[in-house]
Image (cartoon, rainbow, N blue to C red):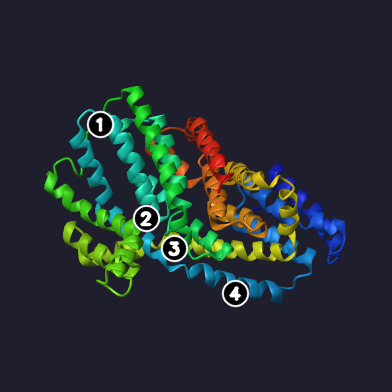
Amino acid sequence: MSLRIDRKTVGIFAVLLVCYVLAFLVKGNTETTYYQLVSVLPLIVILVLLFMQVDMLVAALAGGVMAMIIGGIGIAGANKIMMDTVPKMLSNTVPIINSAVATAVFRAGGYTAALTLVRRGIGGRLEFVAAFIVILQAAATYMSGIGGGSAMVIAPLAFAALGANRYLIAGMSIATAASFTTSPASLESSVVSDLSGTPIAEYVAAMQPYWLMFLVLSIVIAFVGTLKTKQLFTSEADDGFADKSKAELWKLTVPAIFLLFAVIAGPSMNKLLIASGLVETAVFGPLMYTIVTIALIYFCSSLSANESVAAMVSGSEYILKCLFTVGLFLTFIYVIEATGAFKTIASVVALAPASLVVPVAVFVGFLIGVPAGAYVGSILTLVLPITVVLGFTPVQIGMVAIGVGFGSQLSLVNITMQALSAGFRIPIIQVSRGNLPFILGAVVLLLVVSAFV
């Protein structure tokens, strides 16, 4: 096996060498100004490496080891942080369950059937199809917590109905970012919960009004834009569903409808049922809607009981891999935190007027998300510790998370963007450029709202 040495590799090693020399020079001198400045270097190194599309764990290792040198943190200390962090991330059971069940609904054809029904029902009014596709993308992402996985399934269906409609793509992108950053099933919500010490359920409930606000915005963009372009259907309905009757299609959508209701309206229904005295404890929980959804898939689709369960189990693979990866990434972020780096950055951000601290943090998150938005969860682990140090509320932290999410929808390395590029059969740079004016508008709205929360 040969080692390829190019200018990029030489540049990376040169920068790392300089940073490590500085790290050794200030090692342990916590009271000096130089220490405070150099303590931020590991974060800068990680960001630069991520911008250069170096693997997130390689970037985290490079920055983490540097932080260990700067702070005088030994292997034993770093090992303890890892043994605390990774299990904590993997203990986020609800996101794992929701993602797995939503994937099973995907494979059973629930979302495709829903889109086919809408296409048949609205005739030539494609603006309504566009609006429904955005709702479908938002709902699927919100339930599964994975924007890229939802887009991989829905984008080809959207292309079949509307072609490469830039308004629809922008609407899907905004809805996706708002959904996975506020979802009860997403890695991003798990990171917010872990860093802020807020239970996921409380965070999700607090962020629902803002999720709905951006969902409405994305629907309006897709609806008005499609109405303006006056497009026609580019092809017939999905071949696997063209011959199905309306009754068969409705039957296939039942699991998706139930899961959407249980995830979104479940907490409210639990409070209502308990208040009425009909039950004493919550009914709409992960165990109940997992069992019911899998049973509905078995009864309403062509999947057997074994296939339904297998689809659910395989659907957990992606989120489990992400949680494990971010757990390792967070290990090095917590090592960096132990050096006081985030306090140093917070002291700089805090220089902004009090009324602008939150918008500034939101805008910084957006800017970081644009070049490094491949894994929003990993970016949040870099940005959100600063908000925690500054004493942000869960809603304010959520605003920063949404800002990073919006930035990722311009990123050429983002999974959702890649899925949209493949599904709509256009270059990813065209997706990014088409999204730009709409994403910037959404960011302006987010900045205004964040100034008052």
User: In the rendered view, would you say 241 is above or below 291?
Assistant: above
Which residue type does callout 4 highlight?
Answer: Met
Q: Secondary structure at mark 1?
A: loop
Distance of mark 3 from mark 2, alpha carbons?
Answer: 13 Å
Please tell me which residue is depicted at 40% across the width and 31% down the height of the picture: 167
For residue 83, which numbered disc appears in the image?
Answer: 4
User: Which of the two discs, 3 and 4, labels the residue nearer the N terminus?
Assistant: 4
Q: Residue at x 61, y 59 (%)?
A: 57
Of the numbered discs 1 and 2, the one sitting upstream in the chain is: 2
The residue tagged 2 is 143
Q: Check disc 1 and report the residue beneath it.
A: 235
Q: Position of residue 450 (x, y in %)?
A: 56, 45
Residue 354 position in % (x across, y down): 68, 48
Q: Nearer the viewer, mark 4 or mark 1?
A: 4
Q: Nearer the viewer, residue 116 or 3?
A: 116
Secondary structure, mark 4, is helix
Whether residue 40 is situated above or below residue 430 in the rendered picture: below
Residue beneath the point at 27% across and 25% down:
232
Of callouts 2 and 4, which one flags the residue occurring earlier in the amino acid sequence? 4
Where residue 89 appears, as percent x and y from the top left, is: 52, 67
Cβ atoms under marks 4 and 1 closer than 8 Å: no
Q: Quadrant location of residue 8? A: top right
Label 1–label 2 contact, CB within 8 A = no
Kindly check if marks 3 and 2 are in contact, taking CB atoms under 8 A apart as contact. no
**Residue 375 in view, yes or no:** no
Give left or right: position of 125 versus 318. Answer: left
Q: Residues within 10 Å of mark 3 (few under 14, many from 20)?
A: some
What residue is disc 3 on? 201
